[in-house]
Image (cartoon, rainbow, N blue to C red):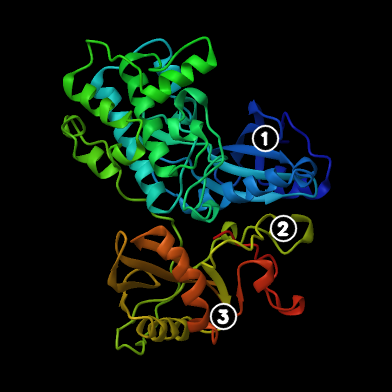
Amino acid sequence: MIKTMWKEREDDARQLVLGRYEIGKLLGMGTFAKVHHGRDLRTGESVAIKIINKEQVKHNHGMMEQIQREISIMRMVRHPNIVELKEVMATKSRIFFVMEYVRGGELFAKVANRRLPEDKARHYFKQLISAIDFCHSRGVSHRDLKPENLLLDENGNLKVSDFGLSALPEQLKHDGLLHTQCGTPAYVAPEVLRNRGYNGACTDIWSCGVILYVLLTGYLPFQHENMMKMYQKIFKADYQVPSWVSSDARRLVSKLLVVDPSKRISIAEILRHPWMKKGSSGLNTKAPNLQIQAKEETEQEDEQGNNIEGLSPRSYNAFDLISSMSSGFDLSSLFENQRRAPTVFTSKAPAAKIINSLGRMAKALGFGIQMEKKEGYKVRMEGKEEGRKGKLAVSVEVFEVAPEVAVVEFSKDAGDTLEYVKFCREDIRPGLKDIVWAWQGKDDMMASDTNLPGTGIAA
């Protein structure tokens, strides 16, 4: 008999949660959520399970948006140095985040009141930059980077956690900036404190600078018992680097902690900095294999003459559909957001027809298209015109959900995020109307009698 420290009163929860996961000791708790250690009964794997009180969330509109955004973001940012969200489930009263369990604890415990050797600091900092670079490439700003949100696994590798305050491009105001003041004061960039709008990626780089300083010294660069005086130090970047820190490390810190965000070092420049090139790389540059199984091979060509022999749509994991067919576990209300770019749609068309339609759309929009072989039904579209950050490149993949039902997902490979959002919102819909069954979002769904059950999909 499975013994647990937590009991769910609802019978359906026993089947879905306790029937699949053994709930163990409490790891931490907040206002709306508790985090427990858990064990996957199918594999024996340890997991962390974040349990959110659904009733409290329903009565807090801002909290519902935050949960919706957090799920969407964690699905987007799968990377070796980011804590993985494995599954999302719910009962009538609770929401469950099943996450990777990181055994080594917080990086904070390693640096509290003591500095790290520079080689070790560099190892962690490279992995942090790798993770944040990947987030920024997906249009995600973390906005709460600090050692308490950086975990270590059993092999000493860093994992970024807690995306509850993260931002997506859809949150930008008319001036193209974010305006919500959030984060931990000692790690927050001066432009956030000034409350005049800020670039989320630039503020993450400032926070990385504070973290690097802490790794090298064992204490914060901006400290004062009086909060306003601490803010004044931040506004002036008033700090001193101890003499034991190497000159290269000192120079990198000075380029990270720059008050003017337009003059702050970029991630590309960080990666080229001499201090970063010392020692072993320890840098993960690719996201892990998402482990979605391929189906049986087919022998076809698309309308552009690309040989798609050996290709077939990959299956869509149940997590990617977010909710089950049971209304008691339907999370679709948490994912309805009219502002979200339509980057996922369902279709009843065969995968080959979807690929052909994508080819026609790409041609009409002046995009080149290339089939990515050995990856199932996946194509890459690239614009011919230079944008703000080079040519826009978009990958599109077709996943098989069930016979005669497919999910098509778009993601940005290169180019400017805002141009990608515009491309999704204004260009994709007209070109694909002949194959789209339903776009994500309640205003785009078809009549209720034709909806695919449980398609509250997070883009």
Q: Residues within 10 Å of mark 1 (few under 14, many from 20)?
A: many
The image's mark for residue 333 is 2
Q: Name the residue nearer the viewer: 357 or 15.
A: 357
Circle 1 — which element? strand
Q: Position of residue 356 (x, y in %)?
A: 41, 86
The image's mark for residue 436 is 3
Circle 2 — which element? helix
Count of labels in the image: 3
The image's mark for residue 23 is 1
Q: Residues within 10 Å of mark 3 (few under 14, many from 20)?
A: some
First along the sequence among labels 1 and 3: 1
Q: Quadrant of the N terminus?
A: top right
Residue at left offset 73%, top offset 47%: 61
Residue at left offset 63%, top offset 45%: 66
First along the sequence among labels 1 and 2: 1
User: Of the residues tagged 1 and 2, which is closer to the observer?
Assistant: 2
Residue type at mark 1? Ile
First along the sequence among labels 2 and 3: 2
Residue at left offset 38%, top offset 68%: 395
Residue 68 shows in the view: yes
Q: Quadrant of residue 60?
A: top right
Q: Quadrant of the C terminus?
A: bottom right
Circle 3 — which element? loop
**Does residue 65 lie above or below 400 as drawn?**
above
Q: Position of residue 110 (x, y in %)?
A: 40, 18
The image's mark for residue 199 is none
Q: Position of residue 95 (x, y in %)?
A: 70, 45
* 277 on left or right of 36: left
